[in-house]
Image: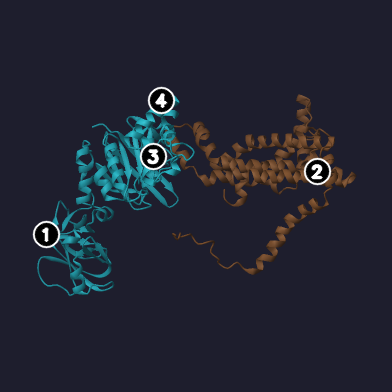
Amino acid sequence: MTTQIRPPRAVHTGLPGGLWAPALLALGLIVLPVIGLLVRAPWDRFGELVTSESALTALELSLRTATISTLLCVLLGGPLAVVLARGSVPGLRLLRSVVLLPLVLPPVVGGLALLYLLGISGFAGYALDVVFGVRVPFTTAAVILAQTFVAMPFLVVSLEGALRTGGDRYESIAATLGAAPWLVFRRITIPLVLPGLGSGMVLSFARCLGEFGATIAFAGSLEGVTRTLPLEVYLQREVDADGAIALSLVLVVVAIVVIALARPRSLEGVG
Amino acid sequence: MTTALDVEVAVRRGEFELDVTMQMGPGEVIAVLGRNGSGKSTLLTSIAGLIRPDHGRIVLDGRVLTDTAAGVRLPPHRRRIGLLAQKPLLFPHLSVLDNVAFAPRAAGMRKAQARELAMRRLAEVDATQFAQRRPRRLSGGQAQRIALARALASDPELLLLDEPLSAVDVEFAPALRSLLRSVLAHQLAVIITHQVIDALVLADRVVVLEDGRVVEQGLTRDVLTRPRSEFAARLAGLNLISGTATEQGLRSAAGAELTGVAEHTVLGEEAVAVFSPAMVAVHTDPPKGGARNVLPDLIEALEPQGSLMRVRGSSGIAADVTPVAAVEMGLHNGGRAWFVVKAAEVAVYPRTAASSFEGYPAPDPSAR
C-alpha cells in the first residue's frame, strides 16, 4: 500500500468561538422563513392554487418580462460595463457610482422617478405622447422598464468586475496580431467574460423576477398586463393567504433553480 | 545605409521619464538591457502603439507609425509589429491551432487556409502535436513556443520580445533560445533581456537603459568587453569604476587614484576603469610596493562563483579567489581587505563612446 501525501486540510488559524452564535443566527434568518412557508403551505390545495388562471397569467407575465428585461440589461448594460472597465474618459469613477444608484435607491422611489420622467406629466413622457402618441406607464413596457432599471447594476457590476479582473493583456496581444477593436471585442473580450456575463445575467433575472416596488409605482397592477407574480402574491395575501403562500413557494422554487443551474460565481467570491 | 526602424520617444509617467532615440538597420536585432524600472517595457509598448508617447516619432520601413507633432498615431493592429511577452498569453478559449491562426484570420484569410498556415508555423517551432490542445494543458516552455509561432503568423515587420525566456523553466530555455536564434536570423527585432547570454546569442547590438535614458549602445561584443555603464559591466562580469581621467589613469568618484592603461582618454573628462575580478587579489594586510592599485575596502559579501569564491567589497568591487585562499586568509563579512590589481590589467577609457556607434553594421547572424 502506498501512502499518499495529501495537502493539509484548511489550516486552523483559530476561528474565534464568539462568531458561531451570530453566524448561525444569520443563517437561521435566511433559511427559517422559507421553512415557515413550507410548513404552513396548503399542500392539499397546492396544485389547484398554483394553476389558477390568475396565477398562471402572472407567472407567464413575470417570466416573459424578466427575460426581456434581462436581455435589455445585456444589450445596454453590457456595453456600459465595457466602457466603464476599459474606457479612458474623465469622470469614469463618478459614473461607476451613478450606476449603483438603482441598487441603493428604494425600488418604489425608482418607480416614481420613472413615472415622473415617462408619465404624461414628465418631460420625456409628454414628448412621447405628443410626438408618437405613446404612453408608457401602466403598460407591460413599463414593467420591463422598471425591471431593467432595478436589475441593470447587477449586470454592469459583475461584468465590469470580470473585465477588470481579466485585464486587457489578451486584448493587447490580439491587437498586435492585427485584430481591429471590433474583432478583438467579438473574439477575445466576449468569450473571456462569458462566466462573468452569465452570473450577471442570473443575478439580473432573479432581481427582475422579484421586482415589486418600482413595478407597482410605475406600471400598476393590471391583470395580464402589469400584474407580475410578486404583485399577484401581495394581492392574494389580502384575499386568500393560502394562495399567496403557494405562489410564494413557486417563486422560491424558481430562485433555487436559478441558483442551482447557474450559480453566480461572483457571489461565491470566486469570479 | 537605410534605416529599418527609427525611434524617438519621450514618455512621462509621474516621476518616471523615458527619453530614448534609437535606430535599427534592416534585419537587425537589438537587445535592450537595463534594471527593472529603467523603462525597457515602456519603450517596447510605445513602439507597439499600446501606450501613447507624450512626444515622439516612430518610423518603420518608411511608414510613420507615430508622429506626435503631426498628430499621427497608427493603432496597434495596423502597425505590423508582433509582440512576444514574458508570459505566453495564449487565448485560453481557443485551441493551439486557432491561437496561431488568429492573425491570418484577422487579416481576412479563410478558416481552412488560415489553419493550414498555422500548421506550418507550428511545424517551424516543432509543436504540431499540440495543435488540438487547449493552452492550459501546455507547459510554460511549450506555450511560449506556440506564442512565438502565433506572433510570427502575423508576418510582423518588427518583432518585439519582452523577456521571452524569463518565465520559461530553466531546462527548456536553451532549446527555446536556439529556436529564437534561428527565427531572428531573418527578422527585425528588439528583445528585452536580463541575461547576457540572450544578448550574445540573439542580438547584433545592445542598448543599455538607465533611468529612462540610453547610457550605452554598441555592438554586443564591444559593450560586453568594453562596458561603459555599471549595468553592462555587471552583466559582463567585470569591475567598473567611474571617475575622471588623470595622467596615470583615473580618479574615482570616491577619490581613489587608479593607474591603468589609458585608451583615448582626455584629462579631466569622465572615464571608467574596467578590470576582471579574476585579476584582483585580496590581502588582509596593506600590501607594499609595485605598480599596483590598492583599494582598501570592507568585505560585504562572499559568494560562490563557479569553482572560485567571489569577494565583494562595500564599494562594489569584486575579486575572485580560491576557496582555500579565502579560508586561509580568514575572509569574512565586515572584515577589512585590500583589493589589489596590477596597472596593466586596468583598462581606462572615456565613459561616453566616441561616435563609433552611429552607423550600424550589416547584420551577420553567424557573428551572433
Label 3 with label 2: CB-CB less than 8 Å: no
Foreground disc of the pair 3, 2: 2
Q: Which x, y percent locates residue B135?
A: 44, 41
Q: Which x, y percent locates residue A174?
A: 45, 36
Left or right of A221? Residue A78 is: left
Instruction: Report in which chain the residue with disc 3 lies.
Output: B
Residue B71 in sight from this viewpoint: no
The quadrant of the picture occupied by the N terminus of chain B is: top left
The verdict on a common chain for dots 4 and 1 is: yes
Which chain did the renderer colour brown? A
Label 1 CA crowd tier, 10 Å (few <14, some 14–19, many 20+):
some
Determine which residue is flagged by label 3: B147
Q: What amino acid type should be assigned to the residue bearing mark 1?
A: Ala
Q: Which x, y percent locates residue B115?
A: 41, 29
Label 3 CA crowd tier, 10 Å (few <14, some 14–19, many 20+):
many
The verdict on a common chain for dots 4 and 3 is: yes
Left or right of B232? Residue B122 is: right
Hue of chain B?
Answer: cyan
Left or right of A89? Residue A110 is: right
Secondary structure state at the residue bearing disc 3: helix
Q: What amino acid type should be assigned to the residue bearing mark 4?
A: Gln
Please tell me which of labels 1 and 3 falls first in the chain. Answer: 3
Q: Which mark is residue B113?
A: 4
A124 or A219, which lies in front? Answer: A219
Left or right of B367? Residue B63 is: right
Instruction: Report in which chain the residue with disc 1 lies.
Output: B
Residue A259 in sight from this viewpoint: yes
Label 2 CA crowd tier, 10 Å (few <14, some 14–19, many 20+):
many
Please tell me which of labels 4 and 3 falls first in the chain. Answer: 4
Determine which residue is flagged by label 2: A247
Determine which residue is flagged by label 1: B344
Secondary structure state at the residue bearing disc 4: helix
